[in-house]
């Protein structure tokens, strides 16, 4: 185990080596009692997290805020660009330089890929990417891995099926690179229109990762540990009939998972791709996964802020 | 006096017995110095209040936030549904389950009656109803009672006139049930169109509460301790002439209350149902009442959060 | 040096004597390590700042929040009038009286001149004007002075050129009165349409302040310590051609300032009146100036809140 978290910024899961990930998962585990307010912490007392959310987000924004506050820290920032100086025509760079002066780290959500990386290059404080366009969402990946590890003890050797919209979802694009580091056997289950992009497949194969692709969930349901479900958006289909057909074929319900030895995960929000009849079963790990955002984001914030000295 | 606050959730004033109310009023009184920041408190340090405000509200939202922060705690949440995941079609239940994972208690404001009760049944953390549609607003009632008690020493034996829109106002619907517990003599003063609903009258009479109804404020002005004024909304009247006539007849001004032995209360916001010439007189207790939200909501949050162990 | 900050409210820079300003600048300097989170402070722990932002503002709002939180305090409030009770027709006075009950000081931003003064007269807690219409923005002036003092050691004897829109900018209107207290030599550089108002010129001349006016930046560039740049808004010009011509003539770029012995300041947001080729040069002090909002606003909040006892 490494002795210190080695990254200054958390921009892409591709910047992580396996032991960087393990370090965060281990730190998150140590923070569980604080995440549940059984213990108090003053670890980040007096520290300020700058929140630049140019794109709406409830879950991600609130969980970063909660993580910061559970550690005794505080947050300032904005939630969408129309209540900020951005409406006056200020550049992204200027907005970032301003907020840098106020805070000890920045969390950025933007609908354009690459924005977090760009900002990390012009400010001195650490930067966390909270989702940039179709790009990366590395802290989501870390909490997904944490959920698997909590459930199975080890990530190595798991069989994971990723289901739904594999083409546009940044969540799955981040996740597969991390799973690859652990040699996880992956199956990609999606309609033809929403298959995993070719460059991702190429990257995985180059690293000798065993992957399978199918459009039929029945092909994997009997031999899988994790069903990682994502939302299929109506807007992706020109013909509503196509959408309705696919929606039915990819519905995860109690009947499908019953007597199987698996868990169901979902980055949320869920619309109707998972039936609520799973909510009160042992298969449901998506609410636990939502909670896991807290200890994992606490671990990230605590480490990057404490490792950095503000100029 | 009971030794501990016995309710897990604060959903409806009808769930309270008299000694539960007395317990909160007594606790609020003990927290006055912290509410005015003469003393500091770390009672809820490390704790997070989840704020689900689906309906706009300044006063209620800010007073809950203030109450939490005066006790050393913190808040996360959203103020209206269009900046939250709700716009992506997420169910109310999923949103609540998510925020449950982040927080130690939830405060909910919604325009539909019953939403707070519903959520309290699916989450493990305590839930506070901060107003649900035409339903209940129990913490408003508690601070109204606290205001009367602070002023008169006892609630028992008071004569209270409720004035204005008694048909649609959730504030008065909550309040009368609580006043009934103290055997308060009530007079309902309203235009014919906005009378107290029959089922409320029925409930009160069943419990042998002395109530009077009138549409003329002059009938009560000489023999009353509290004028509890509520806003009459223009929208309730198809004919604007009707509204203007009634508005004039229900205006509370200095001339009306002068030399009377009474106080004027109002849940605020006030538009013009109370003349500002009362603001600087001894009759005005509505600003004090607004402040009383802090110690009372502190008492509620402190007790429900400290009595509950987060899973 | 005076022993205590003598103002209860911070409404207009015209209420300050030179030693009141010096007191704040000195206090700000002592708070630098806390502003940069090298030290922790609990100076305002348990205290609440009430934020009444009727007009959008990112920089000012976030820096007040940051200042409060760096000192261990907290904030409640609203950012624009349409999410507040104001939409229900509540008066400004009632909104202020409500928030007074919750907080230890109020910060007010409004698009009408005089609003902060009005509110300071009806509430007991200290009030800070965070910009009211074309009126005053005194805390901006204090941080501008702090920036100059940090850079040059003394404000006395400096030569300052104020450039751009001198007619409508409240920032410069506040600043010149303060610079006058220090006997600063000022040059006002603006197009004919946007000259410094006559009453301001009159006030300065009455106090024997040396001022010059010009529309050509070349007249001052060789003999000035500070270029204080403000934005020229397109909306001020009926004819877009006029605007474009002026915009070009007032652009501050590297070529203009190179080999000069001066610094460039700007209250931000900047659009394109300062070329980004200055950003990475020693002339750029506008980002430092943005950061200086934190120690200066900390000094103000700490002093006015600690000097006042809440009733």
Image: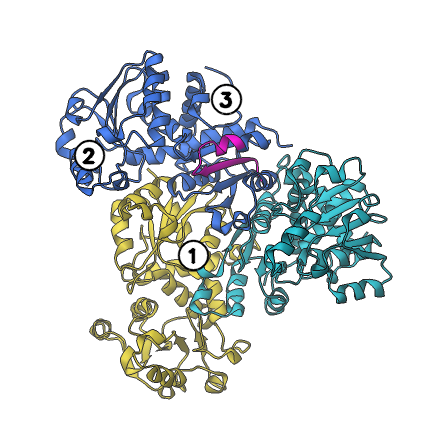
Chain colours: A blue, B yellow, C cyan
Say left or right for A278 vs B273: left
Q: CA distance from mark 2 to mark 1?
A: 35 Å
Q: Is residue B302 visible?
A: yes
Segment colored magenta: A103-118
The crowd level at tag 3 (other Cα within 10 Å; few <14, some 14-19, many 20+) is some
For the point 84% across and 63% down, which residue is it? C205
* Label annotation for residue B276: none
Between B162 and A199, the residue placed more toward the observer is: A199
Which residue is identified by label 3? A5
Between A39 and A256, the residue placed more toward the observer is: A256
Q: CA distance from mark 1 to mark 3?
A: 39 Å
Which residue is identified by label 2? A281
Between B147 and A54, the residue placed more toward the observer is: A54
Residue A112 locus on image (x, y percent): 44, 36
Q: Which chain is indicated by disc 3?
A: A
Query: Which quadrant would the N terminus of chain A be assigned to in this image?
Result: top left
Q: Are marks 2 and 1 on the same chain?
A: no
Say left or right for C288 vs B60: right
Q: Most extreme residue toward the front, as rendered?
A: C241
The crowd level at tag 2 (other Cα within 10 Å; few <14, some 14-19, many 20+) is few
Residue B25 locus on image (x, y percent): 41, 61
Q: CA distance from mark 2 to mark 3?
A: 37 Å
**How many labels, in total?**
3
Q: Is residue B43 visible?
A: no
- Tell me if residue A119 comes above or below residue C1 in the rendering: above
Q: Secondary structure at mark 3?
A: loop
Which residue is identified by label 1? B61
Query: Which quadrant would the C terminus of chain A be assigned to in this image?
Result: top right
Q: Secondary structure at mark 2?
A: loop
Q: Secondary structure at mark 1?
A: helix
Residue B268 locus on image (x, y percent): 43, 69
């Amino acid at each position: 185990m490494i002795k210190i978290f080695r990254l200054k910024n958390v921009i892409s899961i591709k910047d992580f080596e396996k032991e960087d990930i393990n370090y965060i998962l281990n730190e998150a585990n140590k923070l569980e009692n604080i995440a549940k307010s059984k213990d108090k912490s003053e670890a980040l007392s007096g520290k300020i997290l700058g929140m630049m959310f140019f794109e709406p987000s409830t879950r991600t924004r609130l969980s970063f805020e909660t993580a910061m506050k559970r550690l005794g820290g505080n947050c300032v920032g904005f939630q969408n660009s129309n209540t900020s100086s951005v409406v006056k025509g200020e550049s992204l760079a200027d907005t970032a330089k301003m907020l840098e002066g106020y805070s000890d780290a920045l969390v950025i959500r933007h609908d354009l890929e690459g924005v977090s990386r760009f900002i990390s290059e012009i400010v001195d404080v650490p930067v966390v990417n909270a989702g940039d366009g179709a790009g990366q969402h590395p802290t989501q990946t870390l909490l997904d891995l944490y959920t698997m590890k909590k459930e199975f003890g080890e990530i190595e050797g798991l069989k994971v099926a990723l289901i739904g919209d594999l083409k546009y979802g940044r969540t799955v694009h981040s996740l597969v690179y991390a799973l690859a580091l652990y040699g996880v056997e992956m199956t990609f289950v999606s309609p033809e229109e929403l298959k995993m992009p070719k460059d991702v497949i190429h990257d995985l194969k180059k690293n000798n990762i065993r992957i399978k692709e199918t459009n039929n969930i029945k092909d994997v349901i009997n031999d899988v540990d994790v069903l990682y479900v994502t939302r299929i958006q109506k807007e992706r289909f020109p013909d509503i009939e196509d959408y309705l057909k696919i929606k039915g074929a990819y519905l995860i319900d109690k009947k499908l998972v019953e007597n199987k030895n698996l868990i169901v995960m979902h980055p949320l929000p869920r619309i109707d791709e998972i039936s609520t009849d799973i909510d009160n079963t042992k298969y449901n790990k998506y609410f636990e996964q939502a909670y896991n955002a807290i200890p994992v984001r606490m671990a990230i914030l605590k480490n990057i802020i404490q490792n950095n000295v503000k100029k």
